[in-house]
Image (cartoon, helix red, strand yellow):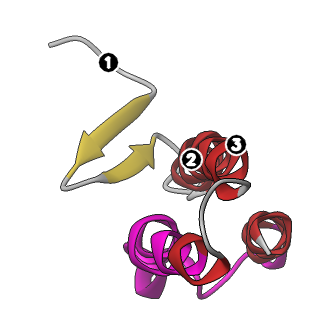
Amino acid sequence: MERVSTYLQLGLHFDEKMSWVSHVTHLISKADKNIGLLWKVSLSLPRTCAENIYKYYIRPQLGYGCVIYDSGNQHLKYLLEGVQRRAA
């Protein structure tokens, strides 16, 4: 059996140290791409439409599994808050 450094199960990225760094970095990169797309189209959309896209598409991606990985590392929380500030 081959040993892997990260493992994806039910949308959560597990690493061999059982830290959530790989999962949170994946969430941040995915959210940053979507925020970039939203930023490009937000100039042609009404503000309420852009807010709804963020609320119903991007924010749930950041919150998926947060009960599990939100309990410990303050640095990871700070990184996720930075993504939400950029989206605002």
SS of the residue at dot 1?
Answer: loop
Span highlighted in magenta in the image? 51-75
Q: For mark 3, does the 10 Å Cα neighbourhood hold few (<14), some (14 to 19), or many (20 or more) residues? A: few
Which one is closest to the eye, mark 2 or mark 1? 2
Q: Nearer the viewer, mark 2 or mark 3?
A: 3
Alpha carbons under labels 3 and 1: distance apart:
41 Å
Q: Nearer the viewer, mark 3 or mark 1?
A: 3
Q: Mark 2 = which residue?
A: 34
Q: Are marks 3 and 1 in contact (CB under 8 Å)?
A: no
User: Looking at this rendering, what residue extends furthest in the top direction?
Assistant: 2
Would you place residue 86 above or below residue 5 in this image? Answer: below
Determine the residue positioned at 47% across, 69% down.
Answer: 53
The 10 Å Cα crowd at callout 2, few under 14, some 14 to 19, many 20 or more, is: some
- Which residue is the site of mark 1? 3
Q: Name the quarter where the C terminus is drawn.
A: bottom right
Query: Which residue sits at x=61%, y=73%?
Result: 46
Q: Which residue is mark 3?
A: 40
Q: Which mark is residue 72?
A: none
Residue 32 versus residue 27: which sits nearer the camera? 32
Judging depth in this view, the residue of 2 and 33 nearest the camera is: 33
Measuring 14% from the left and 13% from the top, which residue is drawn there?
A: 1
Marks 2 and 1, the one that precedes in the sequence: 1
Q: Position of residue 44 (x, y in %)?
A: 65, 54
Mark positioned earlier in the residue sequence (3 or 1): 1
Residue 29 at x, y percent in the picture: 63, 41
What's the residue type where badge 1 is placed? Arg
Cα separation between marks 2 and 1: 32 Å
